[in-house]
């Protein structure tokens, strides 16, 4: 089949890498792709949000299936746009995408279906005083979330109540534009987080993909500003059989069944951001796409054919299509531009061995300049993934491979996976 993949990050590199390995993939196009995705298919200059242009491209290239990497097209309704067209779209309808597009909607969904999550209330400019009062009923730290998409920056965790009150006022006053016109205030949960990925067909069937742990902060030891993610490890030792049984019974099944009961069409990936509170899983957030950099650590551990899986999900019939996991652990380390997650330079020449033996280098913020040289074009530049018999081994391979790659100002965290090794002692 002919496949169009939308997006341009490390996640899309990993999806393209995996899709292109399928014997069922004839032509793979990536729109817009990055400096590395050309190795798996053909990059196309199309915006993932220009649905009319995508429709023309789909007709021109006889595209059978669109795989959507990032959330924006899903939240904007790409599934619904193509509903009457013969092309398959892997993802939720616009109504389903609200699980990520509106935190208030997600919280109400969880409450309705008895899915464990932090207690919360939502406020708008009209109810700001109630919001300030509600804060005094909670214990510090205070968790304030912009309702809408805010490029991963819409969550504030604040220790001081006065600061929390003034941040609430600022958020409702437009700190994140329309995204923070509604603010969710919720109870702070303490525990370790992990990312669980599910592929569902909208008809009650689902497959659980390998579980991953993301490293969100810029600094070693989980310090400093939040980023999109600085590395990932899979599997996650605390997500053992007992924990996953709880996740499946209390979270995955009620989510999949709840979507169906609410009449919400959802044929794609569900990303459950979970927290382990004393052995009990709770939902921190839903995303309606795969994670980044989690995809870079999950795809190499998926032993089954991804084209078979996503096609079956998009057709509403996962049936008995398998999602086998490679038992070997994997570790992904991100190389980022100096200054990230603040402002950072672009156009720095990337040199070294980008095809190391035994590791995979997934491109994220890379581009080819006018002379065809590979240069940096984003904050997160490259994700290096390795599989090995142990997490230690996979870590070592990824860091060794990264040592052979350079660009001016390259930064990476040196402690990806160390906390997990410590936990396993
Ligand atoms: P979100 O965008 O909802 O995933 O929030 C971003 C990050 O904020 C999460 O990955 C958590 O680390 C943290 N966070 C969000 N909600 C809570 C909560 N209720 N308790 C503790 N930490 C939270
Ligand atoms: N790594 C977290 C995310 O993709 O949202």
Image (cartoon, grey):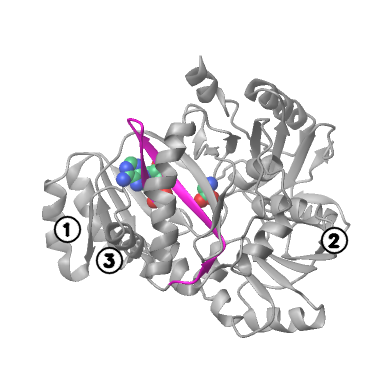
Q: Which residue is mark 3?
A: 173
Do the CB atoms of the residues marked 2 and 1 lie less than 8 Å apart? no
**Which residue lies at the image location 65% right of the left edge and 52% below the top edge?**
11
- The answer to which quarter of the image holds residue 105 is bottom left
- The answer to which quarter of the image holds residue 319 is bottom right
User: Would you place residue 57 above or below residue 424 in this image?
Assistant: below
* Badge number at residue 370: 2
**Which residue lies at the image location 51% right of the left edge and 66% below the top edge?**
203
Do the CB atoms of the residues marked 3 and 2 lie less than 8 Å apart? no
Query: In the drawing, does residue 172 fall left or right of residue 355?
Result: left
Where residue 398 sits in the image (x, y, percent)?
71, 30
Query: In the drawing, does residue 65 fall left or right of residue 353?
Result: left
* Camera-side mark, 3 or 1: 1
- Mark 3: give few (<14), some (14-19) or many (20+) Cα within 10 Å: some
In the rendered structure, does residue 283 fall within the stretch colored magenta?
yes
Q: Earlier in the sequence, mark 3 or mark 2?
A: 3
Secondary element at image label 1: helix
Where residue 22 sits in the image (x, y, percent)?
80, 55
- Label 3 and label 2: CA atoms lie apart by 43 Å
**Which residue lies at the image location 44% right of the left edge and 51% below the top edge?**
252
Q: Quadrant for the N terminus, please.
A: bottom right
State the extent of the magenta-drawn residues as a range: 264-284
Secondary element at image label 3: helix
Q: Which residue is mark 1?
A: 131
């Amino acid at each position: 089949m002919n496949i169009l993949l939308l997006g341009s990050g490390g996640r899309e590199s990993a999806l393209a890498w995996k899709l292109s390995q399928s014997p069922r993939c004839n032509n793979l196009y990536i729109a817009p792709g990055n400096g590395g995705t050309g190795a798996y298919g053909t990059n196309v200059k199309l915006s993932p949000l220009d649905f009319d242009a995508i429709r023309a491209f789909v007709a021109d290239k006889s595209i059978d299936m669109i795989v959507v990497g990032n959330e924006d097209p899903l939240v904007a309704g790409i599934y619904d746009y193509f509903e009457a067209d013969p092309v398959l779209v892997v993802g939720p309808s616009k109504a389903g995408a609200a699980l990520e597009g509106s935190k208030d909607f997600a919280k109400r969904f969880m409450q309705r279906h008895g899915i464990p999550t932090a207690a919360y209330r939502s406020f708008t400019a009209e109810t700001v005083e109630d919001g300030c009062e509600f804060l005094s009923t909670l214990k510090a730290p205070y968790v304030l979330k912009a309702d809408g998409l805010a490029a991963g920056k819409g969550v504030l965790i604040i220790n001081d109540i006065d600061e929390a009150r003034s941040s609430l006022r600022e958020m409702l006053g437009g700190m994140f534009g329309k995204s923070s016109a509604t603010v969710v205030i919720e109870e702070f949960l303490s525990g370790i987080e992990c990312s669980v990925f599910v592929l569902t067909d909208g008809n009650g069937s689902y497959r659980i993909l390998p579980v991953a742990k993301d490293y969100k902060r810029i600094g070693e030891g989980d310090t400093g500003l939040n980023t999109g993610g600085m590395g990932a490890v899979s599997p996650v030792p605390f997500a053992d059989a007992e924990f996953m049984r709880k996740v499946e019974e209390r979270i995955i099944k009620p989510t999949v069944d709840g979507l169906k009961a609410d009449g919400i069409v959802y044929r794609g990936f569900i990303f459950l951001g979970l927290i382990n509170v004393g052995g009990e899983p709770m939902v921190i957030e839903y995303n309606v796409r795969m994670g980044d950099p989690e995809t870079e650590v999950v795809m190499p551990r998926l032993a089954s054919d991804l084209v078979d899986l996503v096609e079956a999900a998009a057709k509403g019939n996962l049936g008995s299509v398998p999602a086998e996991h490679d038992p070997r652990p994997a570790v992904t380390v991100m190389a980022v531009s100096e200054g990230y997650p603040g402002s950072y330079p672009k156009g720095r020449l990337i040199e070294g061995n980008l095809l190391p033996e035994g590791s995979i280098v997934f491109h994220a913020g890379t581009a080819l300049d006018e002379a065809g040289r590979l240069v940096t074009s984003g904050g997160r530049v490259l994700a290096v993934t390795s599989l090995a018999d142990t997490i230690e081994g996979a870590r070592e391979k990824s860091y060794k491979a990264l040592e052979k790659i350079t660009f001016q100002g390259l930064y990476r965290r040196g402690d990806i996976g160390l906390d997990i090794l410590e936990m396993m002692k």
